[in-house]
Amino acid sequence: MTEIPAHIAAIKRPSKKLWPYYVCVAVMTGIGFPVTIVVLFFKYHTMRYRFDAEGIRMSWGILFRQETVVNYARIQDIHLSSNFIERWFGIARIVVQTASGSAMGNLTLEGLTNCEEMRDFLYSRMRGAKEAHAHPATEDGLAGILMEIAGEVRAIRAAL
């Protein structure tokens, strides 16, 4: 598999624009503001991302630590979403779905500013991982497949 692009590997935390968004969300809860702002404060300050050759790792939380790991080969679908306020702040969410049978996404990458690039990167990794599992790339196997294709082309040419 190819190397992780530097601008993707450099993403360790969500954008700083996510915090003002969280404040707006907390304000909209009305009377629940004090509790919501504390929960979102700790979520924002503890949220970490890691992209490596195997997959994506996301973690957050202080009292109840949550960590989610999704391998590229298990990714089934990728959705970009952003509501009005997120678009106003210039951020978006990427919902990564796996074949777990859950109606909700298994991993939601929040507070991303380069969401189209990230989506394209994840799609390329998802496709690359599935192709690698379907056709293990060995030199002998690849050479054999190419020789077989060349033989079929010769047979078609001879038949014409």
Image (cartoon, rainbow, N blue to C red):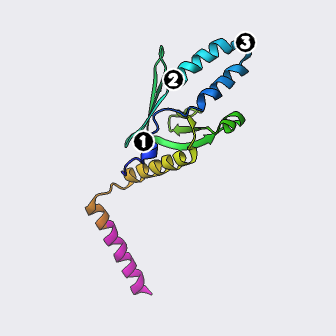
Q: CA distance from mark 1 to mark 2?
A: 19 Å
User: Residue placed farthest to the left in the image?
Assistant: 140
Above/below status of 1 relative to 143: above
Query: The residue under label 2 is which amino acid type?
Result: His
Residue 48 rendering spot, x and y as whole percentages: 46, 29
Say what secondary structure mark 2 lies in. helix
x and y percentages locating residue 154 in the rendered image: 37, 81
Q: Nearer the viewer, residue 129 or 11?
A: 11
Q: How many marks?
A: 3
Residue 147: say if magenta.
yes
- Amino acid type at circle 1 is Ala
The residue depicted at 53 percent of the width and 19 percent of the height is: 42
Real-space Cα separation, disc 3 to disc 2, in angstroms? 23 Å
Q: Residue 31 — which label?
A: 3
Which disc is residue 9 wearing? Answer: 1
Name the front one of labels 3 and 2: 2
| Residue numbers of the magenta segment | 145-160
Q: Secondary structure at mark 1?
A: helix
Prevailing secondary structure of the magenta residues: helix
| Residue ID at (47%, 38%) | 11
Closer to the N terminus: mark 3 or mark 1?
1
Report the amino acid beneath label 3.
Ile
Q: Is residue 31 left or right of residue 153?
A: right
**Placement of the C terminus among the 4 image quadrants:** bottom left
Closer-to-camera residue (91/95): 91
Question: Who is closer to the viewer here, 105 or 34?
Answer: 34
Q: Earlier in the sequence, mark 1 or mark 2?
A: 1
Left or right placement of residue 148 versus residue 44 in this view: left
Confirm or deny contact between disc 3 and disc 2 (CB under 8 A).
Answer: no
Q: Which residue is mark 2?
A: 45
Choose the circle earlier in sequence order: 3 or 2. 3
SS at mark 3 in the image: helix
